[in-house]
Amino acid sequence: MQRKKLNFLFLNLGHFFDHLFMLIFASVAALRLNDEWGMSYAELIPYATPGFVAFGVCAILAGWIADKWSRAGMIVIFFIGIGLSSILAGMASSPLQIASGLTLIGVFAAIYHPVGLAMVVHGRARTGIPLAINGIFGNMGVASAALLTGFLIDNAGWRSAFYLPGVISILLGLAYLVFISSENAAEASDAGAAAAGKSAPASKPRHVLLRVFAIIFFTTAIGGLIFQSTTFALPKIFAERLSDFAGTATRVGWYAFLVFSLAALAQLVVGFLVDRHSIRTVFATVAMLQVIFFAVMTQLSGIAALAVSIAFMFAVFGQIPINDVLVGRMARSEWRSRAYAIRYVVTFSVMASAVPLIGWVHGNWGFELLVRILAIAAATIFAATLLLPASETRLQSA
């Protein structure tokens, strides 16, 4: 039991670092490089796009290797690879060089979601709370990216924002390698257990599977657009709309950290609810809250903007575990990593397209139009959730 808890901790830390690394550049570009390299925010943002493309595309290969070889072994590669890539990104002296480093970060970051989430849900009947806890760690990575980066920029330069997390991740990878290599760590390395199918759900009719997975992929795509747009752009939104009391990179980072940290608690609430109620009802409620809060946000600034930011991020983060619970219930254990991989290829491919969209919208119309677009996107998710078959979205014993 103790080893299971330690393995779960490693997986949670992996989720933390996965999201932290993918958002370091967002704060670096918004708060420092535009001055140091003489480029606007809109000009810098596209250099992050290849990394987000790799974040999505490489998930399929990572999931396939994990199902065929070793999920735990892939997590070791994730920790060490993403750490080395971050150090390389910190050594960049031109936009093309930093784009290369960010692309490598994306390649290794792609490993975590299809592999780590399959390990989190393996052998569990109720997956809502474990996925929620794991999701909170990921959200704290999102929150800490702005906070840590802002602090390091102000005190040690922007390169240290890549160096320090990189070194820590490498050390975690080496520690996890020791953990899974120990004689009694068979539970941590579950390549063989994946074929055992202990947590395999009961077979579902083909038409139900097709319907549910179609809805999963659609809501995943739109949800990815919303998640990426809000988490990537929030430091810049705060720099513009909280300028009266957020005049430094560190302060912007603190406010972003506050919003993301409070919003992360939504996953525990949603995780509890989806283990006990129809996902269709929970999902529809979360989507409608996004529509309402995005619509309210368009004209706000100052303290009001901060308060509503917490509200809409609460709804955005609350959606995260829902699709993962659905995949876990519908996909059999032996191909679950690949199912999660497809889900996250869709997510991160859309997230990659969101990055240039943010730069383009901001450069031409400002963030007010972006928030309106997100409100419309959330409305389409709400409509899609109503098509979920209620009888198939309640918990069934494994």
Image (cartoon, rainbow, N blue to C red):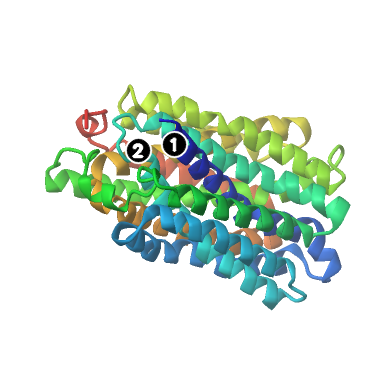
Tag of residue 185: none
The secondary element bearing badge 2 is classed as helix
The numbered dot on residue 3 is 1
Q: Quadrant of residue 250?
A: top right
The answer to whether one can see residue 49 in this image is no
Of residues 353 and 103, the one drawn nearer to the viewer in this rendering: 103
The residue positioned farthest toward the left in the image shown: 205
Label 1: state its secondary structure.
Answer: helix
Q: Amino acid at mark 1?
A: Arg
Q: Which residue is mark 2?
A: 325
Mark 1 to mark 2: distance in Å?
24 Å
* Nearest to viewer (mark 1 / mark 2): 1
List x then y, in percent, for residue 21: 62, 55
Q: Quadrant of the N terminus?
A: top left
Q: Is residue 164 visible?
A: yes
Residue sitting at the far top: 276
Q: Where is residue 291 shown, x and y percent of the image?
A: 50, 37
Compare residues 234 and 107 and report the one nearer the observer: 107
Residue 127 is left or right of residue 169, and the answer is left
**Residue lying at the far front of the rendered structure:** 183
Instruction: Find out whether the residues at labels 1 and 2 contact each other: C-beta distance under 8 Å.
Output: no
